Amino acid sequence: MTKYFYSQALLPIGIILVILARTGFAQVSKLGDISDGSRSHHVHILDLFDEEGALIRLSDKILMPFSPKQTCQECHDYGKISSGWHFNATDSEISPGRRGEPWVLVDPISATQVPLSFRNWSGTFKPEYFGLSPFFFTEKFGRHLTGGGISENDSNEPSDIYMRWMVSGKAEINCLSCHNAEPAHDQAEYDLQIIQQNYRWAAAATSGFATVKGSAKAMPDNYDIYSGATPDISDAVPPSVEYDKNRFSSNGKVLFDIVREAPDQRCYFCHSAKSINESRTERWEVDKDVHLAAGLTCVDCHRNGLDHSITRGYEWEAENTGNPSVASFSCAGCHLRDRESPVPKSGRLGAPYPLHRGLPTVHFEKMTCTACHSGPLPTENAQRVKLSRTHALGTYNVKKGDDVVPYILSPVYVRDDDGKIAPHRLIWPAYWAFMDGDNISPIAPDNVQKITLAFILKDSLTDSTNIAELLAGNLPQFSEIQIIRILDSLKTLNPDDGTPVYICGGKLFSAADSTHLTKQDHPAAQPYTWAFAHDVRPAEQSLGIKDCTDCHSIDAAFSFGTVKAPMPFDFSEGSTISMTSLQGLDTIYPRVFASTFLFRPYLKHLISVCCIIILLILLLYVLKGLEAVLKTWSGTYS
């Protein structure tokens, strides 16, 4: 009787627990999220599931692309993964941390280049200001997105754009972008699929065992992907997927070559940089990061757990994130000893302890380690640099010339968010806007193109081929009169929105009259800068290794290099700013301080001579003292 009573009492409790678990109230760790301590890689032989959770078989009448979310979440917590750094840009609850690399909206026809970010980084603009909803942001920048986040956000979209989401599908987190060790994995193919709005097909296309054809972009809004019916559009091919049958086992499963530690090549696709240096044009002339040359990998330092909160590695990251464990993954945390730590954390992976003999400690208070050890050496004029995300490096049909927009300059030595001087990359915003008082309302490039294109066609271009080249090339060059005419034309767009202005080169330009422009300083025109740390140079190639004048001389690029702001027209006063100005210093004190280093060698010699004289005087007095002692001694015993 008692056993029966307990069994009857426990039954509803068990049912409740099952319901809670399935509805998410009870957190149950999944198989792939729990480590048993083995350092070996798990073999992933998996069933494929489509976005509806249906099992995919090669015999299906209409083959669907596999869904990374549905396929992987059998063993992994997709929700927790989606909170990671690569996916949470739109989450206002996440601390934005140190300013990072922006997305850059580029439109040469309208002479526009603007740093964008969903994070609250001062100096960037929200994509929606320029008409980029989540759908179009994904279409434009999805080539270097890992899916998820903004690429799954179809909420608050207009009805017509919502219908496009139904045709294209959502770009789910593509786990293969980072974790696929498959030799045939082609991330550049992801770009081609995103351009065609094949969002739901993109992951399969890059996998190495599937081929995707057709274009969702060419399909009408009412196209049904499940019907298999070909729309009545000439030359339009619906998107479809074909799997390599040889990759499927007899039970319909596929082997994925998945590794936990993302290979460097996967990181490089989004995080490569090319310095434009006319004296070093070959790839073999550029050394790789000293850490990679020593055998380390990207993820040895940039680590993460299931939540994919990537360790970024800046000095104050521990304070910013509230996670003390990340402190030892900064330059100082890894290389410098922490005497207060009860457990030694420095020297990770054999990191040497730098002695810095003769270096005044004030350098560690005023500068980051990367100021001396990272990036290309400073030059008289800051160099141009091309980046994966801003210049679509690694994709097909990318313009490989060096002189293409956007214009990004590096290294620029300015203060980081913690007040220390660090090497940065810099971009000057250039865009058209309406000004109402001090408020600036940017104008989307599409609304300016029809105006600027008329001037370009009239003065410089003769056929559509040249226009296509300009779209991937330099900013057009306008005369001052043309800028005024463009501003006058913009008045007709929204006459009640304020005064049309053009922002570029760190200044705000407006029409003073029909023949002259006026310029003024404005916060919206200030450059956006973000710190970088790679590639790290060896100690023998660091700044200051020769002597102090590497940085402290009147012609040292570290302090007195110039940063030129490119503009699409010639303005009489130009637009060039010095490194000291960007650091918030006046121009007199740094030069006076630097000039003192001209006399420091002579001062050292003078100090040496003075020391010798003082020693001789002391020696003389010592001898006189001995003489007096001897006389006293001899007089006592004579």
Image (cartoon, rainbow, N blue to C red):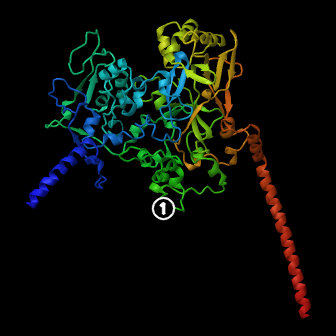
Image point (53%, 44%), residue name:
536
Camera sees residue 295: no
Q: Nearer the viewer, residue 274 or 25?
A: 25
Say above or below: 493 vs 200. above
Report the side of 545 relative to 269 (left or right): right
Percent across and percent down for residue 538 are 54, 48
* Dot 1 crowding, Cα within 10 Å, few <14, some 14–19, many 20+: few
Whether residue 616 sits left or right of residue 490 in the image: it is right
> In percent of the image, x 28 and y 8: which residue is there?
234
Q: Which of the image's four quarters has the N terminus? A: bottom left
Identify whether 551 is placed above or below 1: above
Query: x, y percentage for residue 403?
Result: 55, 24
Q: Residue lying farthest left?
A: 1
State the quadrant of the C terminus.
bottom right
> Relative to 489, does residue 308 appear above or below in the rendering?
below
Amino acid type, residue under disc 1 in the picture: Pro
SS category of the residue bearing label 1? loop
Residue receiving disc 1: 344
